[in-house]
Image: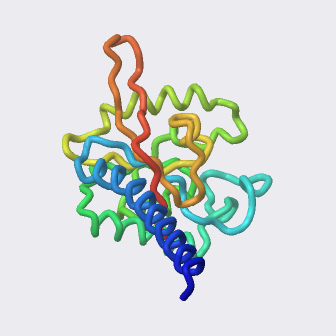
Amino acid sequence: MNHRILHQFVWVSVVWLVAQSSVHASTDAPWSALKQGGHVFLLRHTETVPGIGDPPGYRLDDCKTQRNLSAAGRAQARAWGKAFADNGVQTSDVFSSVWCRCVDTAVLAFGKADTWPALNSHFDTGSGEIQAEQVRGGITTRMKPGKTLVLVTHQVNITALTGRTPAMGEAVVARVVQSADKSKLPRLDVVGMLKLP
């Protein structure tokens, strides 16, 4: 091996190690926060059948009329439940949008879900700011000491709450920060994002 090839090999190895270190660093903080408790796990529903939004004439009381989880999405949801168990994360309550793809994600991952209309998609309604305020106002009453609050919802809702844009099956981990001014709603400070491999 000549010096030029050796130099290139060393350079590629260093770049790979730095990249791996960065990946671990970016996921260590969110998992540590979740294990610590007192944080919010905002999960965008897992993978669905192809499409954007829902078919015309969909009904929230009829899953067959909605865009639902694919087989891969169902497996992905179960994988989140396993990841929480493997990492020793204790959840308190699990709340979901009423859309079937969110409820199914929550139940497959965590075995339970209570619906919370503030988590419903506002893709077509333009009520994002109002719903974000409802969520921020209702989070603290739904949290339990030392446990993680799980919210399963839609991309538009998570973006309105955190400024992040998760892919399907991706999550944002956030810390709830109370304002010194009691008349103001708490804010969500992003610790990091998580996506299963």
Left or right, 121 with respect to 57, comes to left
**Colour scheme employed for the rendering of this structure:** rainbow
- Residue occupying the far left of the picture: 145
Q: Examine the rendered structure and indicate whether residue 62 appears above or below residue 159.
A: below
Residue 87, by quadrant, is bottom left
Write the residue at 56% across / 85% down: 2
- Name the foreground residue: 50 vs 176: 176
| Quarter placement of the N terminus | bottom right
Residue 88, by quadrant, is bottom left
Q: Examine the rendered structure and indicate whether residue 120 appears above or below residue 67.
A: above
Give how far across and how far down residue 22 sits, in percent: 44, 57
- Residue occupying the far right of the picture: 56
Left or right, 21 with respect to 125, comes to left
Give how far across and how far down residue 51 sits, in percent: 74, 61
Write the residue at 42% across / 54% down: 26
Q: Please state the total of marks drawn on the protein image.
A: 0
Left or right, 36 with respect to 180, comes to left
Write the residue at 51% across / 37% down: 162
Left or right, 27 with respect to 142, comes to right
Residue 130 shows in this picture = yes
- Name the foreground residue: 42 vs 102: 42
Q: Examine the rendered structure and indicate whether residue 70 appears above or below residue 39.
A: below
Give how far across and how far down residue 81 sits, in percent: 36, 66
Give how far across and how far down residue 79 sits, in percent: 42, 71
Q: Examine the rendered structure and indicate whether residue 40 appears above or below residue 7.
A: above
Residue 42 shows in this picture = no
- Residue occupying the far bottom of the picture: 1
